[in-house]
Image (cartoon, grey):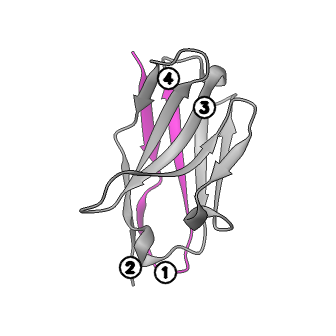
Amino acid sequence: QVQLVESGGGLVQPGGSLRLSCAASGIPFSTYKMAWYRQAPGKERELVATITRLRITDYVDFAKGRFTISRDSTKNTVYLQMNWLKPEDTAVYYCNANSEFIATAMYWGQGTQVTVSS
């Protein structure tokens, strides 16, 4: 049974930081490309950042310079360090796992709420 369990969300003031975690189980973690997405109220889910099994990272424009994605294969966990948070970063953040070898093997976590407000 595949599980992606996010944690670390919460309420933070503008300019603050949060570190999201996503613990994966039931998949060969080292063979998966991991990603973070987010979905704000009334908006479509959008990509935030990705990290390949070889730790190559990529970010969308709004995340560059503020967010850092990383992974720890000893813990089967992917992280998203978010700094200098803005109110427009408020969203539910989702972890995504996508096999780099099996096209149909893709999984989602349940999401964690991030609210940036004073």
- Say what amino acid the circle numbered 1 marks: Pro
Residue tagged 4: 25
Q: How far apart are marks 4 and 3 (CA)?
A: 14 Å
> Do the numbered discs 2 and 4 sit on residues whose CB atoms are within 8 Å?
no
Pick the front one: 36 or 72: 36
- Which residue reaches farthest left? 42
- Say what amino acid the circle numbered 3 marks: Lys
Say above or below: 88 vs 52.
below
- Say what amino acid the circle numbered 4 marks: Ser
Residue tagged 3: 33
> Do the numbered discs 2 and 1 sit on residues whose CB atoms are within 8 Å?
yes
Q: Tell me the number on the disc at residue 14.
A: 1
Q: How far apart are marks 3 and 1 (CA)?
A: 30 Å
> Do the numbered discs 3 and 2 sit on residues whose CB atoms are within 8 Å?
no
Residue tagged 2: 117
Residues packed near mark 2 inside 10 Å, few (<14), some (14 to 19) or many (20 plus) = some
| Label 4: element kind | strand
Instruction: Return the disc, 4 or 3, that comes first in the chain's sequence.
Output: 4
